[in-house]
Image: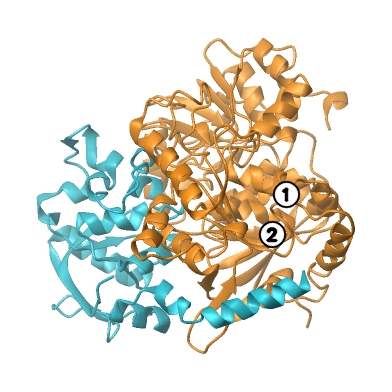
Amino acid sequence: MSEIKSIKGKAAALDRANVDTDQIIPKQFLKRIEKTGFGQFLFYDWRFKEEGVLNPDFELNFPENQGASILIVNENFGCGSSREHAPWSLLDYGFKAIIAPSFADIFHQNSLKNGLLPVILKPEEVSYLLTEAKNEPIELTIDLENETVEDGKGFSTKFPINKYWKTMLMNGWDEIEITMQLEDKIATFEKKEAIHS
Amino acid sequence: MGKSIIDKIWENHLVHQEEGKPDLLYVDLHLVHEVTSPQAFSGLRMKNRKLRRPDKTFATVDHNIPTDNRYVIEDEIALNQMTTLEKNCLEFGVQLAGIDSPDQGIVHVIGPELGLTQPGMTIVCGDSHTSTHGAFGSIAFGIGTSEVEHVMATQSIWRAKPKTLKLEINGELNKGVSAKDVILYVLAKYGIDFGTGHVIEYCGDTIRNMSMEERMTICNMSIEGGARAGLVSPDETTFSYIKGRKFAPKGEEFEAAVEKWKQLASDEDAAYDTVIEIDAADVAPMVSWGTNPSMTAKINDSIPTLNDCQTEVERKSLDRALSYMGLTEGQKIEDIQIQHVFIGSCTNSRIEDLRQAAEVAKGRKVHSNVRALVVPGSQAVKTQAESEGLDVIFKEAGFEWRDSGCSMCLSMNNDIVPPGEHCASTSNRNFEGRQGSGARTHLVSPLMAAAAAINGRFVDVREMMNAETVQ
């Protein structure tokens, strides 16, 4: 995973609540055995009218949203299935961060593990950004180190992020590597277990 | 202040604790299936890592497997995913209940059935319905593929301790009302994110009086309320279910295990972050009408109107859902016509579910507009049902009788609902496209699904049941 310090880019608005992972990446695309190449299937049933024909009414297909790297959505984003294909497809499509008033737990965790930054803002802040982004394209800067989101036009706010995850993301660390340094502790736990059971 | 079962299991599994970090928890059982594991096995291989405890890992194929002829897999990508699991299990020494095995079935059906699932355990699987196993008094939750790889490599997982939610249900359920209706009622009342950040403990006399299969149905859908895990403190019902199962402790070891398991139940004075109380008498047969499981109403009620909505977000969601479902605001649930019925999934595919559905189907015929499938949760459930003659009842009524698998719950195999058609389904999610692009899913209990199959629309199953046939 590469290091993340800050993310600057165009933000696209998808003003929907409870977007589930079945919408983010429908099940027919979960059969691949690789982690790559899922971007083409992102929001498939919403993005395409039929195979290969884009749905012009879907937000991500609007010309002004092309090249967006930040997605602004409404509450409880990523609910449902645990498929990590959801953050893989968002990343592969080009998103680096998702801004929402709340995320579903498993999606939140899966995003952090893959370096897709989930940014939680207050509902009124998300509502403001959704309205702004719907009117005209906006550029946002998400500064992970200082935990801020700014639009360069006066909007500036802090976002909460767990210190552990902040460190992991900023350093691009491999979690398994870190855990393996605790090998002694795991082995001790297993010995103790073996005696008790 | 006493401890809840959640506190107790957490403490028993702490490998490492450090200020400013989540806790490192030991994992007792890692269940694996073909869809969320290939990238994890590849990850191990790339870094030349071993799978630490093959003896605590168990795999099966369930998501992709055909239910009509399991040996004919036309989808090459699906076939590749399944054979990849076989190769991976062989290479890393993981036990696999494969396509030929009598133990094969939906991962959340076979774990309990084989006695792998036991009280006090931490259980993970790359599947959000892992919460099912909480019915045995274990902390069981779904994880993504990165964490699947992490557990394979280290047999442990980083977790911040979740908040606790006590959901107490007391009273007697009305006839024709099942565990599925209880959890759908909870979701209808409290929404799809009331449990986010929490582990739910289900308690109260209604839960105590439930069988293990009913408890599994409830715990299974904890994730539909946003809670990664839901559990029930173990009791005699739990212990007698486990006794004698393939991987359960035997003889004296079993007795010793039961003594340990008895200590797990939450203390009387345990504290919880949130408490919800429900009166079982309020629950009726439920039917979901929208595109998430909280969009659910009682059979005798109607779909809400836009005027009923409290917020703009709610209004938009209702509007979208109605348009997707092809339904109108204020429409009566009993007026919804259905073309498909699916009885199956990790929520409702166990023997008691099939017995209930068969009770309604017996001596009746599936409506001429309806195609109805019964997909047992495991090959063992299938065999048991056949020994009881349930397959004959279903087939005579016009249901298709299939092999086990996830099937039409998420339609990764060929069991698909065509666009625009309505399906009464005993599964757990009614998201857009879940059962096929444009498919319209209605979540119900096995009793209600069978009743819908006979009538071609939703009916109150209580009207079809007489006192003698009620369990």
Q: What's the CA distance linking mark 2 and mark 1?
A: 9 Å
Q: Give the side of residue B54 with respect to residue A93, left or right.
A: right
Which amino acid, by three-letter code, is at mark 2? Leu
Q: Is residue B260 shown above or below B408?
A: below
Residue B260: give x, y in percent of width and height: 83, 68
* Letter of the orange chain: B
Which residue has dot 2 on it? Answer: B231
Residues A173 and B201: in front is A173
Residue B37: give x, y in percent of width and height: 44, 52
Position of the C terminus of chain A by quadrant: bottom right
Q: For the residues tagged 2 and 1, is the chain the same? A: yes
The residue under the point 81% across, 53% down is B238
Q: Which tint is chain A?
A: cyan
The residue under the point 46% across, 54% down is A82
Q: Secondary structure at mark 1?
A: helix
**Can residue B408 be seen by looking at this rendering?**
yes
Which residue has dot 1 on it? Answer: B215
Question: Within the image, what quadrant is residue B351 found in?
Answer: top right
Mark 2 surroundings: few (<14), some (14-19) or many (≥20) residues within 10 A: many
In the rendered structure, the residue with mark 2 lies on which chain?
A: B
Q: Residue furthest bottom?
A: B19
The residue under the point 16% across, 60% down is A68
